[in-house]
Image (tube, rainbow, N blue to C red):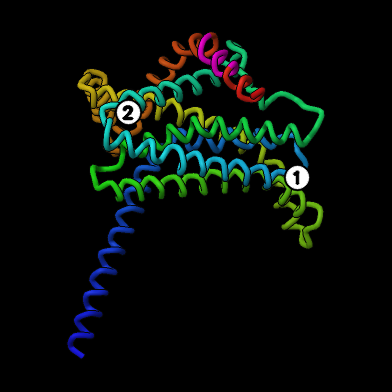
Amino acid sequence: MSGLLALLDDVAAIAKVAAASVDDVMAQATKAGAKAAGAVIDDAAVTPKYVHGFSADRELPIIWRIARGSMINKLVFLLPAGLALSNFAPWAIPPLLMMGGAYLCFEGAEKIAHSFGLVEHHHSDAEESYDDPAHLEEERAKGAIKTDFILSAEIMTIALAAIPSSTFWMEAFTLAAVAVMITVAVYGSVALIVKADDVGLFMANRGRFSLTRRLGEGIVKVMPKFLWLLTIVGTAAMLWVGGSIIVHALHELGVHGPYEAIKGLASALASAIGGPVDALKWLFTAAIDGILGLTLGLILIPIGLKVVTPLWQAVFRKNLKS
């Protein structure tokens, strides 16, 4: 009996260790995922356009197909690549982060410039029209998955950089948890957003109570404004996170000037205003990072539109033909 009790005690101890490990993985995954907020919000803001123009019964299947492709992007391709970088070429992570941050800055600045009519918005082949709905659905899904690969690469790289130094398997499980959590959060939110107007219309037309019908009418009216707000928030988040990534990556590479200057300016502004100093420091730091991201993005617009985008589209069309 004493041996059995000792065995049960050992099993309980092992279970506690396993539970603690799971807690550590989820805690690290949550923190790492939060660092990728800009790319995540942008992903959620961009994806609904890929189901625009399709019948209501095809919206969820298309979103599911894109979500499945996103999961494959993260777990099959980007997770092994991220672990290889972390273990064999950690010096490459800051430059890759800077590339991802520059892309976020370019995308955010390009959206703002387009809204003011300063540039024409670049279109992907997935935005072209086709007479065959099945062909259009196929091309839209492929285009969304390709776009998702870029955003997922940013998310996974940002998450990898945010994970504390640990064992290979802890990093692997944490990155896998980030991939699953973010994919479910993004595409689950997209599904809710896309179907919200259908739910509202159903409630408005078939609601048994006047309150239900009014609520449905309110949902239908609010959704366009909500999508507009989501685009604004996504653009601001891209610029803030993109600028912050570049500043912190430079800091890790030994270029401390921008990081120290922004930190000092945010502290000075927060102290001058008074009140909740820590919250104000964060707010001013985010604002300065966003301004820096916008400035860099505006500089990158000519390069992106005249050089990078044509090359990407040429490769994209070549892959489609092959």
For the point 51% across and 10% down, the residue is 307
Asked if residue 122 is positioned above or below residue 214 in the image, the reply reads above
For the point 53% across and 35% down, the residue is 43
Question: Number of numbered discs present?
Answer: 2
**Could you tell me which secondary element the residue under label 1 belongs to?**
helix
- Decide whether residue 309 is among the magenta residues: yes
Task: Tell me how far mark 2 sits from mark 1, CA to CA.
Answer: 43 Å
Q: Which residue is mark 2?
A: 285
Q: Give the x, y percent position of residue 97.
A: 35, 27
Q: Which residues are magenta?
A: 307-314
Q: Which residue is mark 1?
A: 56
* Mark 2 crowdedness (10 Å alpha carbons): few <14, some 14-19, many ≥20: many
Q: Give the x, y percent position of residue 184.
A: 52, 49
Q: Give the x, y percent position of residue 131.
A: 82, 28
Residue 277 in the figure: left or right of residue 307: left
* Mark 1 crowdedness (10 Å alpha carbons): few <14, some 14-19, many ≥20: few
